[in-house]
Structures are given as C-alpha cells and as structure tokens.
Amino acid sequence: MKKKVAMLLTAAMCVSLAACGGGGGDKPADSGNDAGSAGGTEQTAPPAESGDEGGDAQADAGEPVSGGTFTVAITDDPTTLQGWMVRNTNEGTVSPAIYETLLKYDETGKPQPYLLESFDADAEALTYTLVVKDGITFQDGTPMDAEAVKWNIDYYKENGVLSGSYYNYVDSVEVVDEKTVVVHMSSWDALFDYGLARTCFMCSPTAVEELGPDGFNEAPVGTGAFKVTKWVHGEGIYTERYDNYWGGTPYLDGVNFMIYASTATQQAALEVGDLDVMTLSGDSVTADALKAKGYNLTNAAIPTTGYTLCFNSIAEGPLTDVRVRQAICYAVDAETICNSLLGNGVYGTSTTQWAIPGAATYNDEVTGYGYDVEKAKALLAEAGYADGFELTINFQVGDFAKSVCQIIQAELQEIGITVTLNQIEVANYADYLGEWDGILFHPMGLGNGQFSQVAANMIPGARFGGSTFLHDDVSVGLIQEAVASDEATMDKNLKEAVKVLFQDNVELYAVAVTYSTSVTSPKVHGDYGAVQEHNATWNQLWKEAE
Amino acid sequence: MSEGKAKKTNGARRFFRVFFSRGWVTKLCFGIIVAFVFIAVFAPLLTPYTPYEQNLLSILAGPSGEHLLGCDNIGRDTLTRLLYGARVSLVTGLLSSIWAAAVGTTIGLIAGYVGGWVNTLVMRITDAMIAIPPIIFTMVLSTMVTGNLLGISVVIGVSIIPSYIRMVNGLVISLRENDYVTAANLIGQKQLVIMFRHLLPNCLASLIVTFTMNVGTAIMLESTLSYLGVGIIPPTPAWGVMVSEGYKYLFNQPLVAILPGICIMLVVIAFNIVGDALRDALDPRLRGKL
C-alpha cells in the first residue's frame, strides 16, 4: 500500500514538473514593456491596449441583448451592506450596483450632480441647496425625494462610518419643497460635495425603519439598477434587475457578486467563464497575461490608490529629523519600482503627491526626491546617522504592498538603514491608523481626490495619523482656511499644504499611484470601472447570449 | 576486537541492513535528506547570488543561463532562494524538534515514573493540547512572537511536545514494572538516576523515530504558517513564503510557486519514510519492506 502511495506521489510530482516546464518559457514581465507610456497628462490613465481592442469588439458586437447574469468577483464577504457603513473594498464593489450617490465623480475626479438636478453652494449664507431629479424611486417603490435626502444626510451624520471626516460642519437639513433640500452648515466646508460623492449612498428610509439596521443589512434597498435578492454568507450576493430604475431598465437579469478569495482563483474562474469581471490593482503580470488572452482591460480614469510612506515624525528617534526623512526618500527608487511592477506606467505611476501630473489638484511645485543614494548617505551623515539605524515599516497584507516594502527594505539597507517589515492583517489595520512605529506604508484611497484626503486626514484629531504627523501650524492653518473658503482660495491653500506635507516637512512620500484595472470577459459590453473602480453604467451593461 | 565492540559493530550492521532493506524508496528518501542537509549547509557556495539580491528588470523572468530557475516577483533568483530556504526549513525543523523532544521527554518520563495524580494531570493537559489542531494552535501562538526563526521554532516546538510526552509516558509506564527497575529501587538508587540512566535509554529507539517524523511535521508547519503570513516574515527565503508570494502567479509563472511546493513535499515525505524505516530498523518486530 505504502509503495503505491509513494508511486502515486512521484507521478503527481512529475506531472507538476511537466506543467512547470510548459509555463516557464513565458515572460509576462516583458510584455509590460511595450504596453504604453507612463501616466497621462490628464487625470485619466491611458487605457490599456486591450481596452481599445475591447472597444472595437464592442462596436462589432451589434445591438445590446437583454438577459443573462453578470458575475463580479469579491474576495470575501462584505462586512456590511448598510450604505452608511460601507468602507472596504468588497463593500465598495457590491454597493454601486445597489446604491447611488447624490453626486458622482467625473473623469477628472470632480463631483457632479447625479441623483440631483442641481447642487448650489452659497458660502456666505453657509448653505448648500440640493434639487433632486424627478422620477427616482427606491427599489421598494418609495420616492427618492427631498424628505429621503434629508433623512439620509441626518442619518449619515449620526451613524455614518466616515461622518467624522465628512459631516462635521453639517448643522441642519431643511426640506424646502418636494424636490429641494437646503443643508445649513455650522462652518463653511468647501469639500462637502466630495464627502457626499464618496460616502453618501442613498438608502430607503422606509426600508431602514421597517427592517431595522440589521434587517436592512441583509436586504438593502437603494436607488441602484439592481436589488439584492439574497445574501448567502460565505458564498456571495445575488441581485436582480430593478425594472423601474430611473435611468432605464437594465439589460441584465441580475448581477451576482461571488467570493473568489485570490487573484489566481479569480483568473481561473474568469477563464472558465464562471466570472465576468475581476479587478486588479498593482498587478501588471496578471493584467498583461489576461490581455494577451484576449480579455478586455479598462483602467479607471480616477487613480485608485496612492501607496505612501507615512513617517512618524514626532516619536523620539531618527525620523524626527527632516534630513533623515529626506534621506529615506532619496534612497527609494520609486520610478524603477513603478516601471517594474506597474507595467511601465500602464497600471500606475510614480508621482510626488496624491495626484498625477495634469490633474486639477496636482501641485507642480512639489518636485519630490529623485533617486540619489549618495545624497541620501550625505543627509544621513549630516543628521548624525552615518552608520544607519533600525527602522520598522508597517504595511497592510497585500501582494503589491509586500513586494514594494521588500524592495524598499533592500534599498534602505544600501544606506545603512536596517528595516524590519511588520505585516498587518486587514482586520487589525485600523488599529495602526492612528499611531504607528517608524513608517506606515499606507494605501491611501484616491477615489475622492487629493484635496479631500488632505483636508480630511492631515489635521489634528483626524483618525489617520492623529498621533504621528506633525500637524504644524502652517499646514493645518492652510487646510482650515481652505475648507472654509471659496474654490480659488481652497485650490491655492490645499496645493500649498500638499507642498508642506510632501516636500518641505516630508511627512508623506508617495511611492506609487495605481489605477484599478477591470478585466472583463469579451462577451461583456458596456462601461465597468472606466471612471472609478467598481462603478459601472449598470443599466447599460449587457452580455452576449451563450 | 573486544566482545563489546564486536557486538556494537554487528548491531550497526544489522541496523543498516534492515534500514536499507526496505527498498529503493527508503534509499531515495535518505538521499533526499542528505542532499537537503548538504544544500542547507553549503547554500552560499552553491549560488553566486544572495537570496535578497533584487533585479527589478528580471521580475518573474523565466529560466535562463543567468537564472537557472528564473526569478520571483521582485527579481530575486528563485534557485538561490530555494537553496537558502532549505536552510530555514532545516533550522526550524531541527530546533523545534530538539527543544520539543527535550521538554516532552522529560515531562513524559517524570509523569510516567511518578504516576498517580501527577501523571493524570499531565496526561489530561497533553490530551487537551492534542485535541487542538496543530495548525490552529501554532497560528494562535505565532501571533505572540516575531516572525524570526527562533520564535517560530519555539511555537512549532510547543505544538509537537505532546507527541513526545504521550510516547515516552506510555513507554515508561510499561518499563517501570520491569525487574531491573525494581532492583534499582531495592539497592537504593536515586529516582532521577533510575529515570535517566535506566528508563530513558530504553525509550531512545522510539524517540529517534518520533524525532525524525517530527522534523518533517515541523517543516510542514513552518511552511504552512509562512504561507499564511504568520510564520517567517519576508524577505527571509522560507519555502512557505515563496509559495505564498508565487501563488498569485500560478497561471502566469507557475515555477515560482510550484518549485518551493515540490521542495516542501519531497522533504516532508522523505522524513516520514525515513522515520518509518528507522522504526523498522530499531524494532525487530516491525521488519518489512515498504
């Protein structure tokens, strides 16, 4: 018996080796080299080549057909589907099909009215006036009117997971008529529209009150094109089309969000047709491989994540010296990292801040710190650390973060800094957001743009880095004045604050900005993730018949 | 040649004859272990690279003259990391097994010899520890240590201690009834002397077998923990870490994940089969071929 088992294992090993031989000749890393130029001059990522091919294919695909189910990959059960609690990636993948926001980001990352006819600001009167579009209903048939908007803003301010960041200055909400709502601010918040576009998914007040928050979590009701029919925990979320969707009846019968825990299993499912779309971020190898196999790739126009070295600049130790922080920046070859791991700019790019050149919020005066090991060594010596020191880099579990941190670890070793990597599980990551030892390699979400993130996070009392950033008078003063002023002053001040944070004080060092890449089956047509990751023009998505 | 020396020589001959009489599989596995130890010890001499050397222009490159087994996801030589990975596996396997054997044997020996409520207490705790799946047990413990070799070895050692306690305890309970133990007691030998001079040597054969098999188990546990991200932390070249980092590219550059997987499989199987062969060679009642 044992002999048979041994023979069987040997045979299995031989088969594995044979399989290795077959794939070994491929060089996916090379394929990225001809994929295109670096990030564009607008805040729009250059579309991946096959995205164009996909466009041609779509043009040839003929008239849209109704029916079929669209399957989207998520990596785990969402922790919640309550609109006001949505925060992480899996929730962010599912929610846009169910819920919609009053404003939505355009391709430049600026919020534009979506469920609204108009959105008017009056800084002097400290009011925002919102006029709701006609004919929008929630999936339970109740109207999405001024009362519903008031209920939602009040509810978000009271219960929202990000209320501390985005609803601080909301004083009261007044219903003027059936369509019009006036939001009275206690103090002017020039970025209120960014908060509404990012976090305020419109939930049906009737459903929340009838079902209670827990019941609503299992059967959420929004204004989106698809309504949840069942949530099988550990398996996925099933939806069906909402026939009375205000934008027009969707072509698809339903959209299912199924759990595939890893990129490898998602790729396998996509290739056998069990999955219609998977989303990649910072993974040019898989993206290039799927592109070569004929799948459609679409980069989100709005950069998704800004991978950033966030320095603990106030805890006792070498990092309190700005020259040490500068030295670390000089020692990190961000451009080569991005070229190597992000397909030479196709799937992401190096930059000096949380925006890419050409974007409205980009500050040209922030020149960053180019790769210069000698300069880094000189700065360390000048700061009294010629022999280096020990440093911890903390990062949240993730393939891209792990790769980049290991590269940075090796690069810092060259200037004598011995780095210990501390990998943090996703569930524990929130504990590190307020305070960390050494450096936090943070994946800053850029969906709502640089200004909004700087204003929300780089102030005293913010949940992020509250005990580790300098919060010096200059940057904080600029941010506070910006938020309370008109658009021109806000633009000027926040750009200046970005310069202080990234260039002068070096509290932050942007290593890479990545775009989310949606990989869709060639049989799928329509926009999925073209503007912002996981967002689609849901009612216009359609799928060729099997 | 004295009679004692001749007996020893004959015993060794018989041992090797029985050990290798189990067929080519045992010989192959023994060869794998020898090669594994050789590679672990002489890794720096077998490759021109270090396991941390990166070439960002060779990310996930396939096999070539320069890199015989290609490069990983940040351009490190896969062969080099495999060779150094053997060192990590060997150190973890041996360290954890040695310290678990030392602690487990002592506890099992004392509890078995003393008997009574001490034995009952120790064995119930041991039963409770055995009831917890080792992987869960080690995952929980590993959160309390940093992901270095020593810390992980201690954690893995804790999870395999019960196997030594139970094995030694069972043997001692049976051995302590022998006449030579009674005789030693009657002539007034100290309890510790009886335990460590008379009982322990009679457990050695089984201990060697358990130790060998536990080295394989420890390597497997270390790889699993590292794969799950709670064991050896990157960039240390552990095979489990390599599988974890390469798994994502299974369809696009399978060598990166499959090669360390094969190494883990070979070494663990080798230790188990050699352990089996040792048991046969050391126990005359269990002679036979695989």
Image (cartoon, rainbow, N blue to C red):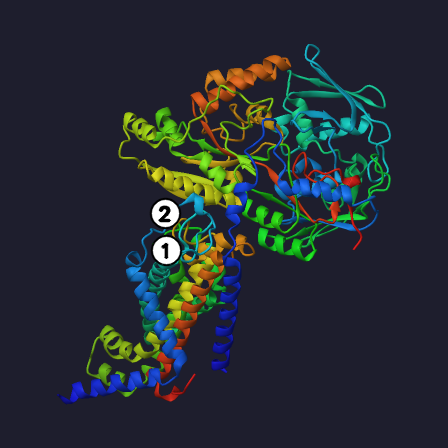
Q: Quadrant of residue A101?
A: top right
Contact, CB < 8 Å: mark 1 with mark 2?
yes
Identify which residue, A524 or A246, lies in the foreground.
A524
The chain carrying label 2 is B
Q: Which residue is mark 2?
A: B53
Q: In the image, what residue occupies the spot 20% across and 88% down? A: B7
Q: Which numbered disc covers residue A271?
A: none
A151, above or below B52, in the image: above
Q: Is residue A305 left or right of residue B15?
A: right
Q: Quadrant of residue A311?
A: top left
Determine the secondary structure under disc 2.
loop
* Residue A162 in sight: yes
* Residue A427 in sight: no
Q: Which residue is mark 1?
A: B80
Identify which residue, A507 or B106, lies in the foreground.
A507
Callout 1 environment at 10 Å: few (<14), some (14 to 19), or many (20+)?
many
Q: Is residue B266 left or right of residue A276?
A: left
Q: Earlier in the sequence, mark 1 or mark 2?
A: 2
> Which quadrant would the C terminus of chain B be assigned to in this image?
bottom left
A399, above or below B3, in the image: above
Q: Position of residue A167 (x, y in %)?
A: 65, 25
Callout 2 environment at 10 Å: few (<14), some (14 to 19), or many (20+)?
some
Q: How many marks?
A: 2
Q: In the image, what residue occupies the spot 56% across and 56% down? A: B251
